[in-house]
Amino acid sequence: MNITEVRVKLTEAKRNRLQAFCSITIDNDFVVRDLKVIEGHKGAFVAMPSRKLTDRCPKCGGKNHLMAQHCNDCGSKLDEKRASKGAGRLKLHADTAHPINSKCREEIQEKVLKAYNEEVEKSKKPGYKPPKYEDMEDLDYVDLDEDMEQEKTDK
């Protein structure tokens, strides 16, 4: 595997753990979008793209996020204990793409964090303009920031 391009879009709110969104191109043929650079307790790390886990309302069958207290469709109260625990805490997201082995994870993390640090340095210079990439323009930054806040309160 050869990571041929890394694109970084820094987030505006530096008080949050979410520092940047990234996309990587593999062998000039395959793009993985929505990787996130997150400031953890031991430093920055790369989180793989993920989706919120949902379940269905027993009354109407409507889809709801596992933390929802009421159904989005019919409004009925949902069971608070319907989310499964994995590794001691609620599993609210599932990776949509991820490396199979540690060597691959380390390579992705190394290249993404290098590109992230370069973008941070560029951002400190006068006249810095964030890159505009079509694949990053449509990300829902607010929703992902809220997800990060929710994860902090869940711990």
Image: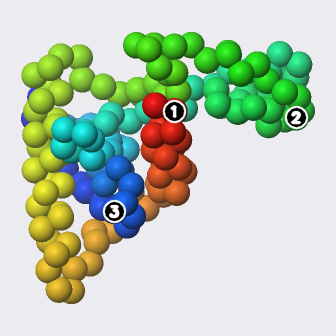
The residue singled out by tag 2 in the image is 75
Q: Which residue is at 53% across, 49% downward?
A: 146
Disc 2 marks a residue whose amino acid type is Gly
Disc 3 marks a residue whose amino acid type is Lys
Q: Which residue is at 64% across, 31% downward?
A: 67
Query: Residue 87's spot in the image, x, y percent?
Result: 40, 13
- Label 2 packing within 10 angstroms: few (<14), some (14-19), many (20+): few
Q: For the residues marked 3 and 1, what is the alpha-carbon distance in whole angstroms? A: 21 Å
The residue singled out by tag 1 in the image is 154
The residue singled out by tag 3 in the image is 14
In the image, is 13 to the left or to the right of 6? right
Query: Residue 54's spot in the image, x, y percent?
Result: 63, 25
- Label 1 packing within 10 angstroms: few (<14), some (14-19), many (20+): few
Residue sitting nearer the eye, 155 or 97: 155
One can see residue 27 in this view: no
Q: Secondary structure at mark 3?
A: loop
Point out the frontmost of discs 3 and 1.
1
The quadrant holding residue 109 is top left
Query: Residue 75's spot in the image, x, y percent?
Result: 88, 34
> Which one is earlier in the sequence, the residue at label 3 or at label 2?
3
* Circles 3, 1 touching at the beta carbon (< 8 Å): no
Q: Is residue 141 above or below residue 30?
A: below
Q: Which residue is at 14% across, 80% downward?
A: 125
Q: Which residue is at 11% across, 61% downward?
A: 118
One can see residue 88 in this view: yes
How many discs appear? 3
Point out the frontmost of discs 3 and 2.
3
